[in-house]
Image (tube, grey):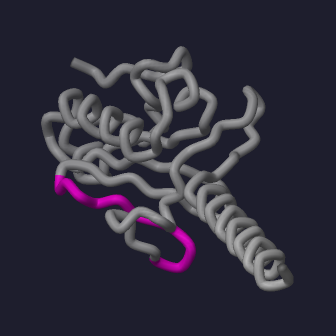
Amino acid sequence: MKKKYFLILFLIIILLITGIIIFYSSQNNKISLKTSSGVVNFNNPETNKNFINYSGTFYYNKNQDYFFSYNKSYNTISITINNPDIQKTRDDAEKEFIKVLGINKSDACKLSVDLRPIGTLISLFELKDINYGLSFCSNSIAFPK
């Protein structure tokens, strides 16, 4: 009889430990960022093998046309356009950004995202060195045609 209770107690402890580990792991896969427009939960770049950690800033550079980064210390997000076809590249970068972070456009607009072309493109197209924002957000600035 004692063996039966010991076995049941052992199984309960194993289930509790497993549940705690699963809960802790799922919490680390998401980052909750409080913004002025509400809380945004997005995929944690630290757990994504496509991000490279360089001194606390996580860079996603799977494509040479653009890259984006997340700075953990300052909770800042940047998208840099690196291709002369700036509008198409902006669209592609924004789609990938939403997909990789696991958010929708509405949540993306709650984040403070600095989107701008790389310096050489600013000179080439005589653009302003400003934050153009995400094209689908109300505060975005269109690239000149």
Question: Who's the residue at 42% across and 42% down the image?
Answer: 129
* Residue furthest front in the image: 1
Question: Where does the magenta region start and end?
Answer: 54-64
Q: Is residue 59 magenta?
A: yes
Q: Is residue 93 magenta?
A: no
Question: Who's the residue at 57% across and 62% down the image?
Answer: 71
Note whether 106 is above or below 73 in the view shown.
Answer: above
Which residue occupies the foreground of this view, 75 or 83? 75
Q: Position of residue 103 (x, y in %)?
A: 49, 34
Classified by dominant secondary structure, the portion drawn in magenta counts as strand
Question: Who's the residue at 70% across and 72% down the image?
Answer: 11
- From the viewer's perspective, is 141 left or right of 76? left
Question: Who's the residue at 55% across and 21% down the image?
Answer: 106
Which residue occupies the foreground of this view, 25 or 128? 25
- From the viewer's perspective, is 94 left or right of 24? left
Note whether 110 is above or below 130 in the view shown.
Answer: above
Residue 115's quadrant in the figure? top left
Q: Quadrant of the N terminus?
A: bottom right
- From the viewer's perspective, is 22 left or right of 144? right
